[in-house]
Image: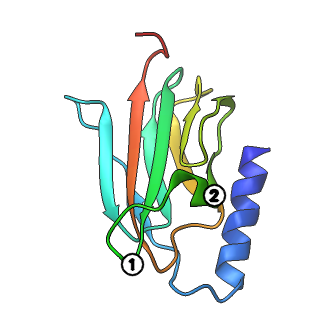
Amino acid sequence: MAAACLTATLAMAAGNGAPGELIEVRVRLSSDTGCWFYFGDATIFTGKFKKGAYIGVSMVTIGRDGFPEAPDQEERSPVLDAPELSGGPANRHWFGPLAASKDYQIMFSPRASFGSTALVTVCGRTSLEN
């Protein structure tokens, strides 16, 4: 289901004349923190994650005034081609445990941060306990 939603989101975004293009960046988790941080206008986040890992994802749009948008104003949910374990607010989500070690793509549906700057955080863990 998530993979189909990601494919549909990519197709819609590419074909709807959205301001900006699909920009992909590579996720590389820090060995110290287990997280990766990005500030910019990318729309697709690709990283190689290990089998059994849990991936935490958040995206916060920075408004034209330079301040983060309120969480209840975010009109998106993260999409990852992996099973969904538990949810949270629209801008935070955990996925896992991942079924295989491979590249996974993360995008946000129904809209990405086209034309906006956003702070994206991706973290990986081997369990949800702690």
Using the numbered discs, state the Cα–Cα distance from disc 1 to disc 2 in whole angstroms.
18 Å
Q: Quick check: 101 left or right of 32?
A: right
Which is nearer the eye, 54 or 58?
A: 58
Which disc number belongs to residue 99? Answer: none
Does 71 appear above or below 87?
A: below
Q: Residue at x 46, y 10 (%)?
A: 129
Q: Quick check: 20 left or right of 97?
A: left
Q: Kindly indicate the quadrant of the structure image that contains residue 14.
A: bottom right
Q: Residue at x 73, y 45 (%)?
A: 2
Amino acid type indicated by mark 1: Arg
Q: Residue at x 32, y 56 (%)?
A: 38
Which quadrant does the N terminus fall into?
A: top right
Amino acid type indicated by mark 2: Arg
Q: Is residue 105 visible?
A: yes
Q: Kindly indicate the quadrant of the structure image that contains residue 104.
A: top right
Does 25 appear above or below 124?
A: below
Residue for badge 2: 76
On the image, the x and y values in percent for residue 79 come to 63, 49
For label 1, the SS is loop
Q: Residue furthest left?
A: 32
On the image, the x and y values in percent for residue 130 come to 40, 10
Which disc number belongs to residue 64? Answer: 1
Q: Is residue 74 visible?
A: no
On the image, the x and y values in percent for residue 83 come to 69, 32
